[in-house]
């Protein structure tokens, strides 16, 4: 089915706390790619249970594009509920085995994830069958050095994770930490531009078919980041503070600043701006309050929808 979505494939669009997921049916077995954030794990289990009932399948496999907390936070709950095996990028397998929360980025960003085991791995160039279709894994460094994306040439479909959204791509975390990431993101976008793709299932936001337009926007955004070294750290602080507030919803402002000031990724972003971490966080919170995305009441920081 060129450009369309086969009946064996279900795209599950979620919000910005939990990544999207893709559900596949192969006979009596099902696979899900990515599982959202741990706060939403009960909802993830309920969504998957409904799909399993609708399709008369059992969940055999969980596949992760990468192991940021918003993509793997439902792994443990789904594995416990349905006995599914978990497949992770090979480059992250040792981090999972040791449960290194810094290397997995959970502690580094002040986020959380329930521990899970990895049963199998995927490397760039590997192929797997999902939904009766053959998918090839491609390396997708940039947002995450260990990330994979999955391409199905016959159906012209792409699971792009956070390498390409309709309106950009995910934070380039390596650059925040002083490592190379922009060149890698450029290369991933150039790779996607060479693939036959008519529909993209991104890690966040709606699925889309205007692939060329999305790539043009992504290349333009990358050029903007390269032109202004302060743009990424400022944006990263806003995104990570807002993300944590989506999780916490309400917390004492002073305690929140203290918690995040110790998170290495946020501290690194502050250093790039020439600020102590606590000062950078206070300024970021003030900006988000001014934008109407957070509120402060009697010393408490409160998330605001939107």
Image (spheres, rainbow, N blue to C red):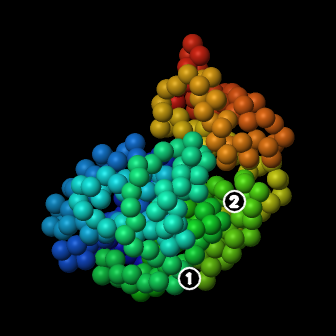
The answer for how far apart the CA atoms under marks 1 and 2 are is 25 Å
Dot 1 or dot 2, earlier in sequence? 2
- The residue drawn where x is 31% and y is 67% is 85
Residue occupying image coordinates x 59% and y 52%: 102
Numbered disc 2: secondary structure: helix
Circle 2 packing at 10 Å, graded few (<14), some (14-19), many (20+), is some
At which x and y percent is residue 121?
Answer: 44, 74
**Residue corresponding to mark 1:** 195
> What secondary structure is marked by label 1?
loop
Between marks 1 and 2 in the image, the one whose residue lies nearer the viewer = 2
Query: Residue 173 is drawn in which quadrant?
Result: bottom right
Q: How many marks?
A: 2
Which residue of the protein is positioned furthest toward the bottom in this rendering? Answer: 154
In the current view of this chain or complex, which residue is farthest to the top? Answer: 298
Q: Is residue 291 above or below residue 176?
A: above
Whether residue 5 is visible to the viewer of this picture, yes or no, is: yes
The answer to whether 110 is drawn above or below residue 216 in the figure is above
Of residues 116 and 11, the one drawn nearer to the viewer in this rendering: 116
Estimate how packed mark 1 is, as few (under 14), some (14 to 19) or many (20 or more) residues with alpha carbons within 10 Å: some
Figure quadrant of the N terminus: bottom left
Which mark identifies residue 174? 2
* Dot label at residue 104: none
């Amino acid at each position: 089915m060129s450009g369309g979505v086969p009946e064996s494939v279900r795209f599950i669009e979620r919000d910005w706390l939990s990544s999207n997921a893709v559900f596949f049916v192969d006979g009596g077995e099902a696979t899900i790619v990515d599982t959202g954030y741990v706060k939403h794990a009960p909802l993830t289990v309920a969504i998957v249970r409904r799909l399993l009932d609708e399709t008369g399948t059992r969940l055999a496999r969980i596949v992760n594009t990468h192991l940021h907390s918003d993509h793997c936070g439902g792994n443990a709950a789904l594995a416990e509920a349905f006995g599914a095996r978990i497949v992770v990028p090979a480059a992250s397998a040792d981090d999972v085995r040791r449960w290194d929360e810094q290397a997995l980025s959970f502690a580094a960003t002040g986020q959380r994830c329930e521990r899970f085991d990895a049963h199998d791995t995927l490397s760039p160039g590997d192929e797997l069958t999902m939904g009766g279709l053959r998918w090839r894994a491609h390396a997708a460094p940039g947002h995450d050095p260990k990330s994979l994306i999955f391409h199905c040439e016959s159906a012209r479909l792409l699971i792009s994770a956070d390498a390409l959204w309709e309106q950009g791509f995910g934070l380039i975390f390596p650059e925040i930490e002083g490592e190379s990431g922009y060149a890698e993101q450029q290369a991933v976008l150039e790779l996607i531009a060479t693939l036959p793709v008519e529909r993209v299932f991104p890690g966040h936001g709606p699925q889309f078919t205007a692939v060329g337009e999305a790539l043009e926007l992504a290349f333009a955004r990358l050029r903007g980041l390269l032109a202004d070294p302060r743009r990424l750290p400022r944006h990263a602080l806003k995104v990570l503070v807002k993300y944590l507030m989506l999780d916490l919803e309400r917390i004492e402002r002073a305690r929140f600043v203290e918690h995040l000031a110790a998170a290495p990724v946020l501290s690194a972003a502050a250093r790039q701006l020439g600020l102590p971490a606590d000062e950078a966080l206070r300024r970021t919170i003030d900006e988000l309050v001014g934008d109407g995305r957070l509120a402060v009441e009697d010393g408490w920081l409160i998330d605001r929808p939107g």
